[in-house]
Amino acid sequence: MRTVVEVENLSKEYRLGVIGNGSLYKDIQSWIAKAQKKPDPWVAMDETSKIGRNRFWALKNVSFKVMQGERLAIIGRNGAGKSTLLKILSRITAPTSGTIRMKGHIASLLEVGTGFHPELTGRENIYLNGAILGMKTHDIDKNFDEIVAFSEIESEFIDTPVKRYSSGMFVRLAFAVAAHLNSEILIADEVLAVGDQRFQEKCLGKMKDVSVNHGRTVLFVSHNLGAVKQLCQKAILLEHGVIKAEGEVGEVANYYDQMIRM
Amino acid sequence: MTDIDDNKWDLVISADKNLVSFDIKEILQYKDLIKLMIRRDFVSVYKQTLFGPLWFIFQPLMSTLVYMFVFGNIAQLGTDGIPQPLFYFSGTMLWSFFATTLQKSSDTFVNNAGLFGKVYFPRFTMPITYMVNALFTLGIQFGFMLIFYVYYFATGYHFALTPWILATPLYIVQLAMLGIGFGIMTSALTTKYRDLRNLVTFGLSILMYATPVVYPISNVPEKWKILFQLNPVTPIIEMFRYSFLGNGNHDLLMWLYSLVASIVLFWVGLVTFTHNEKTFIDVI
């Protein structure tokens, strides 16, 4: 087995408080006040205290490796740094320091139905959403019937604008596109919190199936420990931006369970 | 396994400090996305409308009529001997191509924050999409302008076509580069300062009057002329009118200046844009 994802000393720093004042006019007033050594008229009350000026490390020196075909869960409390890690892995924001190296085509799924346009039909949205997620038109052509079948949407509705869809139909169609991404690495946020229980099971099954049969690597973030245990083999537990535990999914999940009970 | 060679990896993410990290190959990989985005924007504009695509013609046509009345009849501004409808219509369509591209590009980050916050694709695809959509509109309007053209030709008006007509694609490319360049330059700033968006809207409507859209440059007093010609859009519109209608100013030196300005502004825009696209989401 070869390493397909390698994260090395990854850190991300955020500035707390207000970045600028939101308008150039106010910023200029702040600069003038500073130049005249007067107090800044736009300084927020909490910023005068020490805490407000602090910088905050959402991730600190996070390192791990993922082998091909592995399904890795990233768990942790709210604010532990899971979303930040996903955003960096998906190239939505850049890290402050550290490096990530990846092999193969990467698809990231932080939300289902990204870029769906209400005025366009189901068919048009399949193509558009697929393209946003990095698929080529001819790949979608090949998978089109399968996507529609997976979504369980009656074929007479496929040429109807999606604004007329029920919310369930909308979500199923969106997930169906995502489920057919032909990437080697799939990065998924809590996208399974959609649809009814049965459809969630189906999505999990599909993700596992592609991983087992086609060697796809999955990085999965979820609060749902049940789903995590069902899908993944390994897990990483984040706490305050550092890795608290890593290893076999059952052990890490138990550790996390105990931790949140304390 | 421990030997780390960046060349073996398909993707390396790090805190990139490069000044320009513009990757044309990557954008070409997303050409299907660009096509679909163009289609989406084009189609969604006239879904559930009464007149549909006719709006692309109505708008410049109404402006032309208003300009003919206000600037042609009331203010009695000249048109360098070019028939008024042709003069105003050609100016308006070129100006709105530039202005629309600029305005939309300048909102790239603000308008796509939801999308950019959820999925990665080269951010520069969006300004390209906006420009191509404006280009389609321009194409339709250009076709309409030819109707005027044929009408005047049939009624015996003599147009002195010049070989410069062959440079038309270059004029359009110039306007596109200026529009995108200015637009993406301000897009980096509008993420931080929202009020700059108002300034862009307001500035564009002022700038239109500093560009020979509703008057020819020959009407400008001699001492102010150089100031007007420093506006890089001015020589393009003047050259376009000269190429098709044979009248008006054509100052080749000023046009070369505007060509250089377009390239420089486009490049500066790219630098600021690529510098900001990686972390804008933390600021917005």
Image (cartoon, coloured by chain):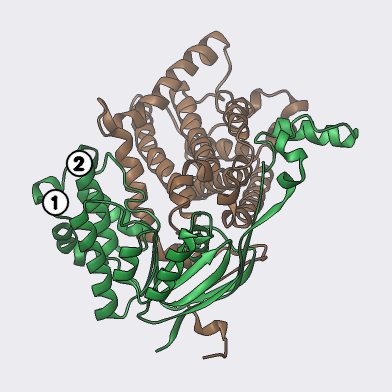
Chain colours: A green, B brown
Residue drawn at x 35%, y 25% as measured from the top left: B58
Q: In this rendering, do the residues under marks 1 and 2 share a single chain? A: yes
Element on which disc 1 rests? loop
Q: Give residue A57's position: percent from left, percent from top.
A: 64, 59
Residue drawn at x 72%, y 51% as measured from the top left: A54
Eyeballing the image, is B2 above or below B170? below
Element on which disc 2 rests? loop
Q: Give residue B91's position: percent from left, percent from top.
A: 51, 30
Q: Residues within 10 Å of mark 2 (few under 14, many from 20)?
A: some
Closer to the camera in the image, A211 or A222: A222
Tell me if A125 is positioned left or right of B29 in this view: left
For residue A165, which numbered disc appears in the image?
2
Q: Give residue A226's position: percent from left, percent from top.
A: 31, 64
Quadrant where the image shows the N terminus of chain A: bottom left
Separation of disc 1 and disc 2 at Cα?
Answer: 10 Å
Which residue bears the numbered disc 1?
A153
Q: Residues within 10 Å of mark 1 (few under 14, many from 20)?
A: some
Disc 1 and disc 2 in contact, CB within 8 angstroms: yes
Q: Give residue B228's position: percent from left, percent from top.
A: 69, 31
Badge 2 amino acid: Tyr
Which corner quadrant of the image does residue B146 belong to?
top left
Residue drawn at x 45%, y 28% as measured from the top left: B89
Residue drawn at x 43%, y 56% as measured from the top left: B119
